[in-house]
């Protein structure tokens, strides 16, 4: 089955810096890769996603890149702000299972003013 | 549109009891997936329901079960609760078809087993 690894587990940056979180997946047939942001005590929130037929997608300060050959995808946050502090999860859609998402272990991002 | 709702938000149960959790998806969405979130295991897929049928299941014991009603609302049931079942149970709503894979989570039910 699909396996997703996420690095780093924690990330600390200064406000205004960029942050990059990386994930690798094992199933080359996976075709959908979402990213979720989870603030303390709140639900995971879908912030951006990418499909396997696209190499990069941007939405304001966040972007996701996908390298299908290497089976890895990354989240890029530019001009970080304190409100970006949260746990970020990457996920890959299991190729055998409709809406089954396999999640990475999460990255705790701290943005210091 | 109203978002995904889950009830109850908090539950405390004793080992050996059973529990039923409820999820109402976004209006028009026909797919409901359930996930268990724990500090040790992260987010793990339990099962997915679409049009009242379970179409995928994760690696959880048979004590975990679910169902979906004709209005797309879903319930999950855990029987013979164990201490290790303490977790945040999240449901996610998706349209379920037409190549649309986006899933939107509810606020979760925090289950504590004592």
Image (cartoon, coloured by chain):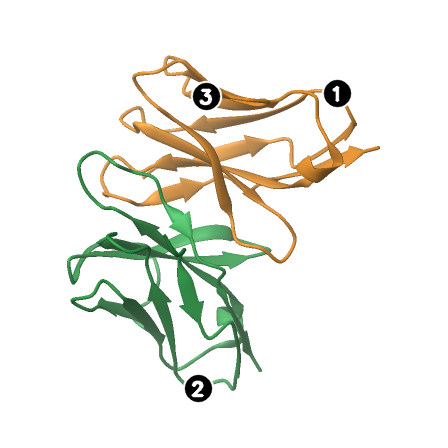
Chain colours: A orange, B green
Cα distance in 3D space between marks 2 and 3: 42 Å
Q: Which callout, 2 or 3, points to the residue nearer the camera?
A: 3
Residue B11 horizontal side relative to residue B31, left or right: right
- Tell me: residue B16, above or below residue A35: below
- Tell me: residue B48, above or below residue A55: below
CB under 8 Å between discs 1 and 2: no
Question: Depth check: B97 or B111 in front?
Answer: B97
Q: Quadrant of the C terminus of chain A?
A: top right
User: Where does the image place residue A100, in percent across and percent down from the top left?
Assistant: 31, 45
Residue at x-position 18% and y-position 41%? B97
Q: Chain of mark 3?
A: A
Residue at disc 1, secondary structure: loop
Marks 2/3 same chain: no
Residue at disc 3, secondary structure: strand
Q: Which callout, 1 or 2, points to the residue nearer the camera?
A: 1
Residue B19 horizontal side relative to residue A35, left or right: left
Q: Quadrant of the N terminus of chain A?
A: top left
Q: Tell me the crowding category of disc 3: few under 14, some 14 to 19, or many 20 or more residues within 10 angstroms, Cα based.
A: some
- Identify the residue under disc 3: A72
- Identify the residue under disc 1: A17
User: Where does the image place residue B47, in percent across and percent down from the top left?
Assistant: 29, 57
| Residue B105 numbered tag | none
User: Where does the image place residue A8, in percent across and percent down from the top left?
Assistant: 64, 31
Q: Residue furthest right?
A: A113
Cα distance in 3D space between marks 1 and 2: 50 Å
Question: Depth check: B39 or A45 in front?
Answer: A45
Marks 3/1 same chain: yes
Q: Tell me the crowding category of disc 2: few under 14, some 14 to 19, or many 20 or more residues within 10 angstroms, Cα based.
A: some
- Identify the residue under disc 2: B16
Q: Tell me the crowding category of disc 1: few under 14, some 14 to 19, or many 20 or more residues within 10 angstroms, Cα based.
A: some
């Amino acid at each position: 089955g699909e396996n997703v690894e996420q690095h780093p587990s924690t990330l600390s940056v200064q406000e205004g810096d960029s942050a990059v979180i990386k994930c690798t997946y094992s199933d080359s047939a996976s075709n959908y890769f979402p990213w979720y942001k989870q603030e303390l005590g709140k639900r995971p929130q879908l912030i951006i996603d990418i499909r396997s037929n696209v190499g990069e997608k941007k939405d304001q300060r966040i972007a996701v890149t996908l390298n299908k050959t290497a089976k890895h995808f990354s989240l890029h946050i530019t001009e970080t702000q304190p409100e970006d502090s949260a746990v970020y999860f990457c996920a890959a859609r299991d190729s055998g299972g409709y809406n089954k998402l396999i999640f990475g272990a999460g990255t705790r991002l701290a943005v210091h003013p | 549109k109203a978002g995904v709702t889950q009830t109850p938000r908090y539950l405390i149960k004793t080992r050996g009891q059973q529990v039923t959790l409820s999820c109402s998806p976004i209006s028009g969405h026909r797919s409901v997936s359930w996930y268990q979130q724990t500090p040790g295991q992260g987010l793990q897929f339990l099962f997915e329901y679409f049009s009242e049928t379970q179409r995928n299941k994760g690696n959880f014991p048979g004590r975990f079960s679910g169902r979906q009603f004709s209005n797309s609302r879903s319930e999950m049931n855990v029987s013979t609760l164990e201490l290790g079942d303490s977790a945040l149970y999240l449901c996610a709503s998706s349209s379920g078809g037409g190549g649309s894979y986006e899933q939107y989570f509810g606020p979760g039910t925090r289950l504590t087993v004592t």
